[in-house]
Image (spheres, grey):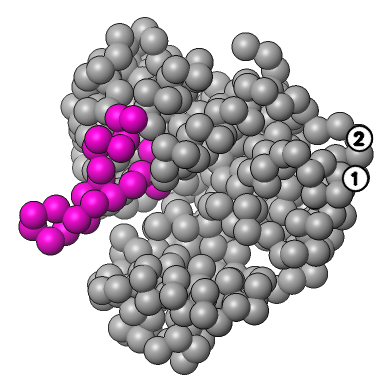
Amino acid sequence: MDEMAKFGFGFMRLPEIEGADGEMHIDIDQAKEMVDIFMDAGFTYFDTARRYHFGKSEAALKEALVDRYPRDSFQLASKLPAWVAKGPDEARAMFDASLDQTSAGYFDFFLMHNLGEYRTKAFDEYGIWDFLFQKKEDGLIRKLGLSFHDNAAALEAVLDSHRPLDFVQLQINFADWENSLIESRKCYEVARARNLPVVIMEPLKGGSLVHLPAAAVEVLREANPEVPLASWGLRFAASLPGVLTVLSGMSTADQVRENTRIMTSLGPLNEQERVALEQARAILASVPTVPCTSCGYCVEGCPEGVRIPSALYALNIMTLFDDMPMASHEYDWRTAGGRASSCIECGACELACPQHIEVMKELARAAELFE
């Protein structure tokens, strides 16, 4: 494959259906179809984690991929979130649980999951660095890395105080490239200064970059009217030197078809497109929105089951598009069973949020606007 064909399937936002028990479950039939489209296009990197889909992603990946394809035909990545464990034994047991859930035999890539802020210390206190390096020596991990949600200085401190890793996974997209909170460019530069390959997550900022303000869309369409909006984010990320793969958490078969086509048939950004993307970034930076990427960490710890990313998504529709009917429809549909008004202001969501959002304040605004 050519240089643009660096693409990974994130098992984070899979389609769901309601089961006989009234609960939402991963739609395995659709997941299988999506895996087949992805593999048929020549891509082989799959990314999952213990916490994705409330702990169901690894088992879904086993059923949709591992059970159906030869082990040497794909690369599999999973992650260990030590910061949710109550102690070292529980944290270390997560590795064996992931091996069991996926039935993968070994991991091509394995990550310490979501280091940054208070979450970092658990990996040291529980001895997870040495534990996972031993798993690598035992042949159960081929490449060991970490995923990171914090600033560049914190990333530099972590990398320089531990044994060298094989790669890092960072949140990088054109909207956050110069963002003072996310520091995409600065984190990328920290990794590259240490010759670490980079796996890119959130290249479309949780799908937000295909729902751009009209002024930004106009700029991009003028530069190249033939390419889909998703191509700008994916091609920006894939064009960066030192990128191992670009992950996309796709939710439909059509998204898989479009994104694999982008990554196989469209080349890197040309100079005219780069200028247009800078102009679009400036437009985005001028619009104050809630920087939610729908990672779901806030939901997992919410005692009331509030559909937090969905509520924030509806707020952003109003901010970007000033479309109350659309925003209200999205809110009513996506937050059923977990309205913003159910928030008891315990603060668990704000502790879990990688984007440092004032979630409780935003939920109060959503409740007032949509309920």
Q: Nearer the viewer, residue 363 or 162?
A: 363
Residue at the far front in the pictured view: 226
Q: Which residue is mark 2?
A: 271
Tell me which amino acid carries mark 1. Val
Q: Nearer the viewer, residue 186 or 335?
A: 335
Q: Is residue 91 above or below residue 61?
A: below
Which residue bears the numbered disc 1? 275
Magenta span: 10-33
Q: Is residue 46 above or below residue 122?
A: above
Q: Quadrant of the C terminus?
A: bottom left
**Residue furthest left in the image:** 21
Q: Secondary structure at mark 1?
A: helix
Secondary-structure class at tag 2: helix
**Residue 143 screen position, x and y as percent:** 47, 19
> Magenta includes 43?
no
Residue 105 seen in the figure: yes
Residue visible at 35% across and 86% down?
Answer: 341
